[in-house]
Amino acid sequence: MLASSVGANKSRATVANGPRVALFWMRLGPYHVARAEALRSALIDQGGELALCEVSNQDHYAWSTRSEPREDWIQTLFQGQDYASLRTAQIAASVAQFLTQMRPDVVAVNGWSALEARAALNWARTNSCTAIVMSETKADDGKRRYVKELAKRWVLRGVTGGLVGGQAQRDYLATLGVPKEQIFLGYNAVDNAYFSEQSAKSRAQSERLAVSSVPYFFASARFLARKNLDGLLRAYADYRAHAQQPWGMAIAGSGEEENNLKRLCSDLQLDSVVQWPGFVQYEELPRWYAGAGAFIHPAKAEAWGLVANEAAACSLPLLIANPVGARFELLEEGVNGFGFDPYSDAQITAAMLRVSAMDSEQRAYLGAAAKARVDQYGPARFAQGMLSAIDAAHNVRGSV
């Protein structure tokens, strides 16, 4: 297990003065690792230690699985097994074993519904360990039923610190019993520097773009009904009927609605102008952002939407549906983009017409403003928010 090897580097030599933190996610994507690396660096500076743990390296996301050995502070509990195939008892036992070997001072988990989160929170309560919950959920993400909300409060009993994306997420987590003054911001971050640098390189070497000969709207999402990609296609068809020089469209992703969406695309006679690049791997994403004229996220329900962070870091104007969590923190209406009602195809069309009618200088201004905004929401903010949550939680426990 990781606990036997964590700290065979700088962190072990200095761990006596700072907290030992165990950080859990179901599966590690590139943005999880970027956040964790920033936190680990900050903890080492304090004489602390971080162990980053994923349950499995295979799930419904099509991220390419890393085959090379990871650093010794990163652990996979079930290597090569799909998360959906694991039993509750397996996950609970493995999480408990991992934590018992590491003996952390702090356990930080992603939400309250995942099996590993509940197992880690149970271990923390049993072992008088500080628990921090990370959440991107807000109140309007779905229907809230009284009994389920009570169950969440029960799962989160004893949690004295939180890390969330924005104010809406803070408000909701506070309704579940975590003290509002103990909840800090910074959870929803990507590696801004990576996207900024790589998209700039692609723009500087335009022959590498090779994804479209004209500007295009870029959307990236799992193909689920709530993502409203069907509404986007309908609105885009209307857009093409009204735009003097219409842009193209690229919709990246995959999922259960793929066949329906492509059928709709054909019915709307858009096959020649809509690209379907599939699930775009991390290394290729900046190239697609770099070639786009604007980013669009049309979801009817979305807790956050990290693709908005990525697009902003690539200096793209943002077109974001009103329910998308990232809109509240990242979108400045008329400054770096425009919001719209996802239930109104006409409003989606209007947003596309508005940005594509701008000249390149105006769009560059919006893109620069988007980047300046998201620069405040990078991995360093995640690290600082987590440290603040840990300090606040420890102060509460120390006063009890």
Image: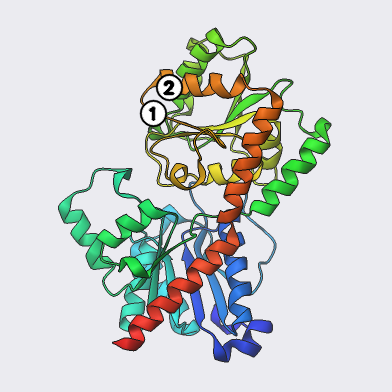
Q: Is residue 159 above or below residue 376?
A: below
Residue 131's disc is none
- Element at badge 2? helix
Residue 347's disc is 2
Q: Nearer the viewer, residue 60 or 337?
A: 337
Q: Is residue 191 left or right of residue 209?
A: left
Q: Is residue 397 above or below residue 204?
A: below
What residue occupies the far bottom of the structure in this picture?
16
Q: Position of residue 327 (x, y in %)?
A: 46, 42
Q: Position of residue 253 (x, y in %)?
A: 55, 35
Query: Looking at the figure, which quarter contains the C terminus?
Result: bottom left
**Residue at the image position 47 percent from the left and 45 percent from the top:** 326
Q: Is residue 234 above or below residue 113?
A: above
Q: Is residue 346 visible?
A: yes
Give the colour scheme of this rendering.
rainbow
Query: Label 2 is placed on what type of residue?
Result: Gln
**Residue at the image position 56 percent from the left and 13 percent from the top:** 270
Residue 341's disc is 1
Per the model, the C-alpha gap separating discs 2 and 1 is 6 Å
Query: Label 1 is placed on what type of residue?
Result: Asp
Q: Is residue 254 above or below residue 236?
A: below
Q: Is residue 372 left or right of residue 266?
A: right
What crowding class fits label 1: few (fewer than 14 Cα within 10 Å), some (14-19), or many (20 or more)? some
**Residue at the image position 70 percent from the left and 31 percent from the top:** 291
What crowding class fits label 2: few (fewer than 14 Cα within 10 Å), some (14-19), or many (20 or more)? some
> Which tag, 2 or 1, sits closer to the chain's start?
1
CB under 8 Å between discs 2 and 1? yes
Q: Is residue 292 visible?
A: no
Q: Position of residue 123 (x, y in %)?
A: 35, 77
